[in-house]
Every structure is written in C-alpha cells, then in structure tokens.
Image: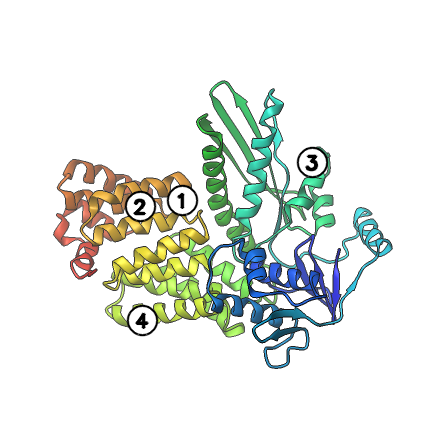
C-alpha cells in the first residue's frame, strides 16, 4: 500500500518513490530502510533491528548504516541537522516521526482501474523492467520450482544494476499464467521493458529462451537461447541467471543510450548511459574520448553521479593500461580520486570496488586489487570481469599458473562478454610467462580474432614476454 509523506509517495509494491509524479532515484538498500522505518514508525527502531532487516545479518560497519540513514533523509528532502522526518535518538536507535497517510482500498482500486483502462497514471521516465514468470515447457510439472527460481533469482540480480528499477517479484508473479500484451503490461506496471522467457527440459538437456521487449512499442530488442547439459539444477540456475544478468546489463545500457539520444534535455543518467554505450562499442581511442565527453557532461549536471564518476575513472585507467598516455601517474591518480569519491557516496557499490581494484593492480598494488575485486564479488556475484581482472593481477604477481582458472570463471558467468578479447589476452600472456608458448599463441590468436583493433595484442603475438606492455607494468608491480 502506498505511503504519502510530505508531498512524496512511497509505493512499496512498485518500489518507487515519487514527488509531484517525478520518480526519485533511490538505491535499493536506502529504499528498503526507508520502507522499514515508515512501517515501524510507531516505535524506535534499534541499530541491530536495522542490520537484521536490511542486511539480513550480514556484517556491515556503523558508517555504512549512517550513510544509508542520511541517504534516506535526503531522499525525502530531510537532513541530519533538521531531522524533521527521520530522527536519531542517541544510544537508542532511529524513528520515523513524519506524518504518514496511507491510501484506502477505494483509492487503490481507482488507480488500478485507470491503468487497466489503458491510461497510464505516471509516464515511465527511467529505466524500469519487469521479469515475467518464465514458462515451464517441460512435461514434468515438478520442474516448476526450478523455473520459478530462475525468475526470482534474475529479478534479484537485476536489481543490482545501477539506474535500473526492477518491478518486485510479488507483483510480477500475479501475472503468472495470464495472457496479456506487453504494452498493456507496461502501462499497468509503469515498466519500460519486459523480460519474458521459457524453460524446457528434454532428456539430459535444458533449454532456456529469453527475450527483451520494449513495453512502449512492443518491439523485440534482444533474444537469447541457452542450452545446457543437466547437472546440479541449483548450480545450473546460478549459471543461467548470471549469464542472463551480464547480457541484459549490456543490452539495457545500449537501449537506454538510444533513448537518451532522442531526448532534447538529457539528464545526468541519460548522459551516463550514452558514455557507457560508447565504451561498450569497443575501447578504441575515438570511443574512449567520446565516452569521457558524456561522463563529463553528466558530472556538470550532477557532480554526485556515481555512474559518471566511475565512467571517467574507467576511461582514465584505460589510458594507463594501454599506454596511451605519457602521464600515467596523473591519470591513475585522477581515476583513484574519482573512484574514492564514488565510494564515499555509495560505500557498498560493487562496481566502484571493482574499479578501485583496477586502479590498484595497475599502480603496483596488485594484492590490494585482488582484495577489492573479491569484495566486489561478495556484493555482486555476477561481475564476471572481476574474475578476469583477478586473473590479470595474478599474472602481475608472478602467479600465472592461477590466471586461466579465473578467466574460465569469468567466461562461465558471461560467455559472450564484450571483454572476452581481453580475457583471452590475459591467459595468453600468462602462458608466455609460464613458458607454454604453443598455448600462449593459441590464446593470443583467439584474442586477436575477437578484436583486431588493439595494437598491443599483435605485439604480444609477435614478441616474447619481456616486450609486452603489460609485462613492463608487471615488472613494477609490488605486493
């Protein structure tokens, strides 16, 4: 049931916070905390209760909790000084003290009726998606639990994508077994995209089909099929969901960037999507420079844009990693500063921790880099490239025998990743360091076939290990 608070509307079912019909950007944990405090506004909520309810018992620091409370205040126009809505009581906890009004059944029914009739009450103004319950095409109804598990896990994993609003699982499952047009569905749920799919078991194989649809136009944007030999069903579920989450992240960025191109007044998020899309086109100098321009424009609009800060840091570190600048120290320092600023704004941002890991491994701190990537994976298990960069860090540390295993894990999570050519390159140079020349040549050739536009890939194939640009960096890399 929606809550009305001082001009804001918090809809727990849709996981939306709006003010004057404008959708507010709220991180998932901040939204959960806000909802919990409002639901328990009749009492003081202790620190331990918040840890249990929001983090499910996972150990996090007091500073993390404080940052989430401050973010919850900011989302409603409150501050730590005023505390007119969310009040901290010393050594006791926190209480929501603002006036809250809940809609009654008639108001809810009127809202639903207006949407069913095809008149959207609120226009979709930000990336939003609903994962419909996948269809079980197998003869065995006992497979239903596996199919529902794929849907539920994918909904959870997609919610980790920054800037993407995911319709809650409970809402999506109310449409199970119903035949409904995607455009009508988009209007009812205020969703921009619809993901639907099916799972079929035949003999010893499992087939999963998925398609991403633009809910406003009904156009199909992307489709994929996964064929797997049946092993442990829960392991398969994790593998399928991870592959889907990685692929969808890329597709949604491209789709949002195309929308932003048509916007006469793009906001910071629009510009960030466009910058990310240029990086996804391939990290050649032209794309990198265009990406930087979009990220800088985004920061000019919103200097606290975490996505734009991480985008510029990525560009700077690419300049360092590919030796495209003589000012490596300057670019690496700028990247580190932007990543640390992003982490100050979003301490549990998985991509930010991974970005910091990238800075560390290219600035003589490979061991610390590995620790950051491992922390990022605890926050988001689907960061395939984190596994890939751990493999590179192991090469820098002279532990090339471990590189291939990490790269294979990256490929398991994202078989068709845009970074695949880099991962193949990492294995190639690791094999060279081990003296396995034939295997090195095979991996490097695969890397070049995947991307012929990076000169150092050709250098690696033509030269010995000591002439490698990455080898030059690895010789300077310290524990």
- Name the residue tied to disc 3: 176
**Element marked by disc 1:** loop
Query: Which badge, 1 or 4, is on the more N-terminal residue?
Result: 4
> Is 348 situated above or below 403?
below
Tell me the mark number nearer the camera, choosing from 2 and 3: 3
Quarter of the picture containing the N terminus is bottom right
Q: Is residue 221 visible?
A: no
Residue at the extreme front = 91
- Name the residue tied to disc 2: 423
Query: Which badge, 3 or 1, is on the more N-terminal residue?
Result: 3
Task: Compare residues 249 and 444 and report the one nearer the observer.
Answer: 249
Is 61 on the left or on the right of 119, as rendered? left
Task: Compare residues 276 and 20 and report the one nearer the observer.
Answer: 20
**Residue at left 71%, top 40%?**
174
- Name the residue tied to disc 4: 333
* Disc on res. 417: 1
Q: Position of residue 112 (x, y in %)?
A: 80, 50
**Element marked by disc 3:** loop
Q: Position of residue 368 (x, y in %)?
A: 29, 60
Task: Compare residues 415 and 110 and report the one nearer the observer.
Answer: 110
In three-dimensional space, the C-alpha distance between marks 4 and 2, rounded to whole angstroms, equals 25 Å
**Residue at left 69%, top 66%?**
43
């Amino acid at each position: 049931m929606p809550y009305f608070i001082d001009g804001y509307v918090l809809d727990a079912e849709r996981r939306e916070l709006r003010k004057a019909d404008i959708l507010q950007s709220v991180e998932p944990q901040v939204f959960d905390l806000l909802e919990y405090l409002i639901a328990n506004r009749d009492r003081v909520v202790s620190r331990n209760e918040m840890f249990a309810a929001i983090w499910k018992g996972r150990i996090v620091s007091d500073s993390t909790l404080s940052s989430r409370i401050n973010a919850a205040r900011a989302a409603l126009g409150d501050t730590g000084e005023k505390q007119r809505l969310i009040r901290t009581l010393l050594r006791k906890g926190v209480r929501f003290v603002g006036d809250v009004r809940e809609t009654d059944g008639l108001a809810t029914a009127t809202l639903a009726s207006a949407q069913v009739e095809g008149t959207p009450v609120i226009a979709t103004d930000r990336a939003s998606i609903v994962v419909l319950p996948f269809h079980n095409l197998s003869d065995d109804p006992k497979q239903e639990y596996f199919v529902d598990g794929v849907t539920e896990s994918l909904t959870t994993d997609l919610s980790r994508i920054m800037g993407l609003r995911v319709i809650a699982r409970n809402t999506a499952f109310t449409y199970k077994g119903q035949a409904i047009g995607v455009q009508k569905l988009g209007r009812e749920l205020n969703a921009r995209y619809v993901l639907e799919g099916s799972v079929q078991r035949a003999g010893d194989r499992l087939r999963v089909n998925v398609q991403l649809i633009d809910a406003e136009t009904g156009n199909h944007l992307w489709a994929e099929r996964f064929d797997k030999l049946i092993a442990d069903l829960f392991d398969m579920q994790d593998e399928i969901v991870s592959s889907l989450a990685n692929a969808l992240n890329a597709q949604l960025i491209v789709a949002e960037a195309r929308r932003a191109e048509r916007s006469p007044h793009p906001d910071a998020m629009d510009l960030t999507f466009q910058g990310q899309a240029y990086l996804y086109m391939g990290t050649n100098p032209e794309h990198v420079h265009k990406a930087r321009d979009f990220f800088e424009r985004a920061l000019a609009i919103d200097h606290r844009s975490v996505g734009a800060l991480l985008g510029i840091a990525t560009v700077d570190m690419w300049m360092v990693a590919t030796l495209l600048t003589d000012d490596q120290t300057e670019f690496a320092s700028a990247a580190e500063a932007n990543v640390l600023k992003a982490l100050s704004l979003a301490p549990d941002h998985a991509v930010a921790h991974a970005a910091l890991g990238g800075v560390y491994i290219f600035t003589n701190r490979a061991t610390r880099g590995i620790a950051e990537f491992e922390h990022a994976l605890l926050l988001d298990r689907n960061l395939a490239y984190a596994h890939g960069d751990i493999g590179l860090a192991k090469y820098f540390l002279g532990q090339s025998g471990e590189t291939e295993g990490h790269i294979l894990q990256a490929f398991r999570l994202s078989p068709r990743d845009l970074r695949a050519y880099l991962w193949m390159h990492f294995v190639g140079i690791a094999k060279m360091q081990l003296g396995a020349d034939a295997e090195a040549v095979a991996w490097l050739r695969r890397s070049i076939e995947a991307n012929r536009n990076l000169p150092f890939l050709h250098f690696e194939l033509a030269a010995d290990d000591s002439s490698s640009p990455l080898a030059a960096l690895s010789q300077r890399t310290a524990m």
